[in-house]
Amino acid sequence: MAGDYNPMELMICLAARYLEDGATVVVGTGAPCAAAMLAQRLHAPNLTIMFEAGGVAPILPTMPISVGDSRTFWRALMATSMDDIMSFCQKGMVDYTFLGGAQVDMYGNINSTMIGTDYARPRVRFPGSGGANDLGSLCWRTMMITPQDRRRFVPKCNFVTTPGYLTGPGAREAAGLPPGTGPYKVITNLCVIGFDEETKRMRVESLHPGITREQVQENTGFELLWADDLGRSQPPTAEELQVLRTEVDPYRYIIGR
Amino acid sequence: MQEAQPGGTQPLFMTPDVDAARQHFRAKPKGMVDKVTTVSEAVARLIHDGDYIAIGGFGANRIPTAVLHEIVRQGRRHLGVSGHTATHDFQILAAGGCMDRCDVAYVVGLEARGLSRVSRRLFEDGGIQATEWTNAALAWRYRAAAMGIPFIPARNMLGTDTLRYSAAKVITCPYTGVKLVALPALYPDVAIIHVHRADRYGNCQIDGINVADNDLARAAKRVIITAERLVPTEHFRREPHRTAIPFFCVDAVIEVPYGSYPGNMPYEYFSDEEHLREWLAAEEDPATFRQFLDRYIYGTRDFNEYLELCGGIEKLRRLRAQEWLVERPNSA
């Protein structure tokens, strides 16, 4: 049974495993929220989930539609403000966050603002930062769950909405961002990517079952680094899938995509 | 696009002049007077062409829909808007062609629901002047204004194009030497906030997250409150620790039951995902969208007519049941 899963289910299970018990995480809607809920129901019962609009430690009854809807503080321990949540991030109390975007480069810089070259007349306008820049600047470790293709994994973002490692080693610190923060893992439909200590560039850590190095590189618009001990991503266990399908997302809002 | 920049290059729409703000707040009437009025009177009196407005709640959660519809019906133009997770609220104002400038944190999207074509076009066709910020930046800009200080230092935005296309400046901390972004105080001309309970004088309670509304109500020069329920002042005296907004910040109070519809109102009713889908779909074709707006906004006299058109009491009963998970939750 564990052999039968879709890419979204795999990505959610892989992401969930990085969230340890006792950690704090700010999540959005969709896959990151599912990953946090799954972690909480398996190995991390004391994972504290927060939402940028003010929800703290809810018992999520179902997938939120908005990071500010009433699900995000359902049976919560606190319903507070955006200022409060972002201040927790800024003072160093939030371990993880998850972000997405239209483009990401080899340093994990993310674009969720626009496609095009003229800010005043973008070819495609996207929502902008929302809380992404804040979370990617201020949380300790930033993760992404994203489909991987050349349109999205680009040599250079048209607009850097949210800082990854900017132009490389030392650039975040030079810009004034809190030291020790930055991108941590990028979990795609093909592989798990980390960041090389020295160059701060994306480095593939494990390939998903059935995926080759060539496939991963073909779907990336820049040159990837490869871990010496390149491994295979561990597929979801039967228990992970069961909890994901029956408790976390029974209506298949996310895993049915 | 990204290179070392001392600060942002885009316009600062509202001055962080704290002494001018003090003069305004000194002159503001602060007596306990009856402020109950109608939506149309409040919009006519308090929101003028060219004003800069800020909307409470969070996009499609606890939003003052009735006032937004009325702004469109009264044909306000050249409004500046604080786009602090502006989703359905922004969509309404974009439909009405009411805006010409925007402090952007989150616009044109409706989170998991998709993107608004009409809102996107506004930016892509250069129909609106934009300055980039972030959700925390706008929340903290309200905070600075609420505190009466010209800027607040923070550690977000640094090193990015978000900073470059903002109006923020970068400063060095006089104590520690760390680099900081200086976020200028934002004093909107008008804040419009939907709350759970208010009295006739403007004291307000908000249940659940307040997002940035405690600060917004203190930052804005004029404040319009819509409330699910009007309650006696005694209600506030029994539990003063629960007052989110005090009467002396407020200029108008209107009782609007189901006032956040089709948005979510915590502990009251969930968002109407069917109607929000219908809205997004209608935007795909200009003629269809014109009919849609004629039906729901221009052709209605007030918010109650809109609620009736959208399914009336039976629809609202269902959304209440969904809020409490008595019926199957809706999805985007």
Image: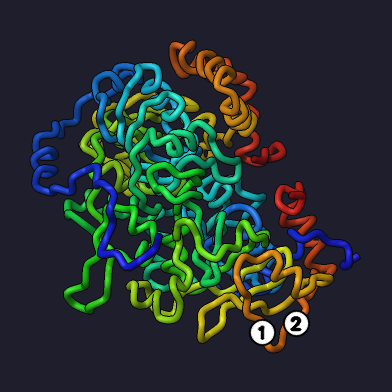
Chain under numbered label 2: A
Residue picked out by circle 1: A227
The amino acid sitting under disc 1 is Ala
The amino acid sitting under disc 2 is Gly
Q: Name which residue lies at 60% across and 41% down.
A: B113
Visible residue check, residue B239: no
| Image-based side of B327 in relation to B76, left or right | right
For mark 1, give the secondary structure: strand
Query: Quadrant of residue A240 in the image?
Result: bottom right
For the N terminus of chain A, give its image quadrant: bottom right
- Which class describes the residues within 10 Å of circle 1: few (<14), some (14-19), or many (20+)? some
- Give the image location of residue B191, x and y in percent: 30, 36
- Which class describes the residues within 10 Å of circle 2: few (<14), some (14-19), or many (20+)? some
- Give the image location of residue A125, x and y in percent: 48, 44
Please state which of the two labelled residues, at mark 2 or mark 1, is closer to the viewer: 1
Residue picked out by circle 2: A231
Q: Name which residue lies at 51% across and 72% down.
A: A107
Q: Is residue A191 above or below residue B258?
A: below
* Outermost residue toward the bottom in this view: A228
Query: Quadrant of residue B36 in the image?
Result: top left
